[in-house]
């Protein structure tokens, strides 16, 4: 069986490795336009911040390492054509056109950074960050810069802004919406994060679109909708990604509102063509409708599903909740499921409670404040959670992910047994405190 995988990111290279674990005889070829494969894009901000010494440290394997697994990785190759009738793909490598035939094709084309339609985005010093090469460019430019603007206050934007502050730059982060991390947090929780960003030396501008970037050849300033302008020796466009769909459309795959439509086996509408990662739509666990999940964890889970499906084993990709966690400075923050506003937008009447707790027993040294917000539906079923603290956030988000996946109510979770020791938790876990408080709003 010949398997061709287009894209060397988390979804693509993981698919190749997972197929090889199951099928030792499959002929596997991975094509990527990048120079590197098997690296962690999520780690790029932490390299810039100096938390990780070098970009080389976030590359887990080189392309040649896959030869030992009998996986052919072709780097710096641009796939230009997919013929689903003849089951062939064409690609350009070193200026020459080549062709491959396949039995199974996996599209892991990911997404391209969204570039806002405004003047000045083509100036030198304006960057999007998609891969390690982009990170290197930002790192080099920052050496001679004094001020930086990051537009887009989602996860990547916040992490990049914090990294640039650690490099000694005067940093402003902007967001068109009236809060940071609008997809994952309600405003009251986002305001806690905003205050921390400001304490870390980041200027936060909310509810203001950037109208233009200005400079003579290279960026020098940015102007806002209210007419104000600020100096900026460099600009990072952290305005999200748009799925790369050209090859999918060429192959005849059905495309939904955002991306490629796949079933629970990661099969597209075209026989023997599969898709994974940022270029596909996933099923939302709570609503049952399609959504997008641009998370590396999603791509890796999908790669395991598609590998089993391709070799004929039982496989099913479960719906998503978009659980996330991040850390800037000493602060961890995470969320899973719906925000209050998103629930309301989808005709769900949310019942919400926010509590303040501690990460350890209150008498134990260095106990840290923990803010937890729990969102339930009108029946008490947990549909969302947001947490901010200086420690122990990730495992609690994971716990709430499992609770939502299992359809637990706040009453169910309030009776679940949790482990306890003074150095690691309160005797009543902060999650239990939160669900007990929201339970009081029900008869």
Image: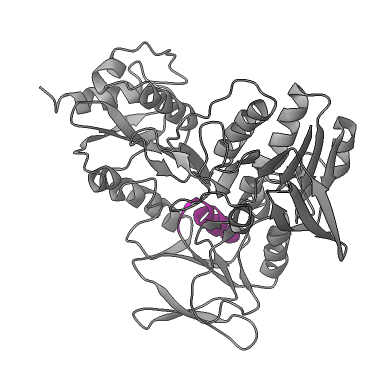
Find out whether residue 154 is within the magenta segment. yes
For image coordinates 57% across by 66% down, the residue present is: 236
On the image, the x and y values in percent for residue 165 come to: 56, 60
Main secondary structure type of the part rendered in magenta: helix
Magenta span of residues: 153-165
Find out whether residue 7 is within the magenta segment. no
The answer to whether residue 358 is left or right of residue 221 is: left
Q: Quadrant of residue 136?
A: bottom right
On the image, the x and y values in percent for residue 55 come to: 75, 50
Height in image: 160 above or below 331? Answer: below
View extreme (left): residue:
443
The reply to whether residue 244 is visible in this rendering is no
- Quadrant occupied by the N terminus: top right
Q: Quadrant of residue 57?
A: top right
On the image, the x and y values in percent for residue 102 come to: 77, 42
View extreme (front): residue:
85
For image coordinates 56% across by 69% down, the residue present is: 148
Q: Name the residue nearer the viewer: 280 or 212.
A: 280
- Quadrant occupied by the C terminus: top left
For image coordinates 60% across by 64% down, the residue present is: 128
View extreme (bottom): residue:
216
For image coordinates 37% across by 40% down, the residue present is: 289
């Amino acid at each position: 069986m010949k398997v061709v995988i287009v894209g060397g990111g988390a979804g693509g290279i993981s698919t190749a490795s997972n197929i090889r674990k199951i099928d030792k005889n499959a002929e596997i070829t991975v094509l990527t336009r990048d120079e590197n494969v098997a690296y962690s894009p999520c780690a790029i901000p932490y390299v810039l911040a100096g938390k990780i010494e070098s970009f080389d440290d976030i590359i887990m394997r080189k392309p040649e390492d896959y030869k030992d697994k009998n996986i052919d990785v072709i780097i710096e190759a641009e796939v230009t054509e997919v013929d689903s009738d003849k089951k062939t793909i064409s690609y350009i490598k070193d200026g020459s056109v080549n062709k491959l035939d396949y039995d199974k094709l996996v599209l892991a084309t990911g997404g391209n950074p969204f570039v806002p339609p405004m003047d000045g985005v083509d100036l030198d010093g304006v960057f999007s960050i998609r891969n390690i090469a982009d990170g290197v460019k930002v790192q080099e430019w920052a050496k001679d810069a004094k001020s930086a603007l990051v537009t887009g206050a989602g996860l990547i934007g916040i992490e990049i802004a914090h990294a640039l502050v650690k490099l000694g730059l005067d940093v402003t982060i902007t967001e068109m919406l009236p809060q940071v991390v609008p997809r994952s947090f309600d405003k009251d929780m986002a305001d806690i994060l905003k205050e921390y960003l400001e304490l870390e030396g980041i200027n936060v501008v909310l509810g203001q679109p950037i109208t233009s970037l200005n400079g003579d050849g290279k960026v020098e300033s940015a102007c806002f909708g209210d007419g104000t302008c600020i100096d900026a020796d460099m600009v990072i466009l952290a305005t999200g990604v748009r799925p790369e769909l050209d090859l999918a459309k060429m192959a005849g795959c059905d495309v939904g509102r955002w991306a490629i439509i796949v079933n629970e086996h990661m099969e597209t509408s075209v026989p023997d063509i599969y898709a994974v990662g940022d270029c596909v739509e996933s099923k939302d666990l709570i609503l049952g409708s399609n959504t997008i999940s641009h998370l590396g964890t999603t791509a890796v889970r999908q790669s395991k599903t598609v590998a089993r499906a391709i070799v004929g084993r039982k496989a099913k990709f479960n719906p998503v909740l978009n659980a996330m966690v991040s850390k800037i400075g000493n602060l961890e923050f995470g969320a899973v499921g719906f925000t209050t506003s998103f629930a309301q937008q989808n005709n769900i009447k949310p019942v919400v409670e926010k509590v303040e707790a501690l990460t350890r027993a209150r008498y134990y040294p260095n106990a840290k404040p923990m803010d937890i917000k729990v969102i339930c539906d009108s029946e008490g079923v947990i549909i969302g959670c947001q947490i901010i603290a200086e420690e122990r956030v990730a495992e609690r988000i994971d716990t709430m992910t499992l609770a939502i996946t299992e359809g637990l109510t706040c009453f169910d979770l309030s009776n679940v047994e949790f482990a306890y020791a003074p150095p690691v938790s309160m005797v009543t876990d902060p999650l239990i405190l939160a669900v007990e408080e929201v339970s009081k709003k029900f008869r």
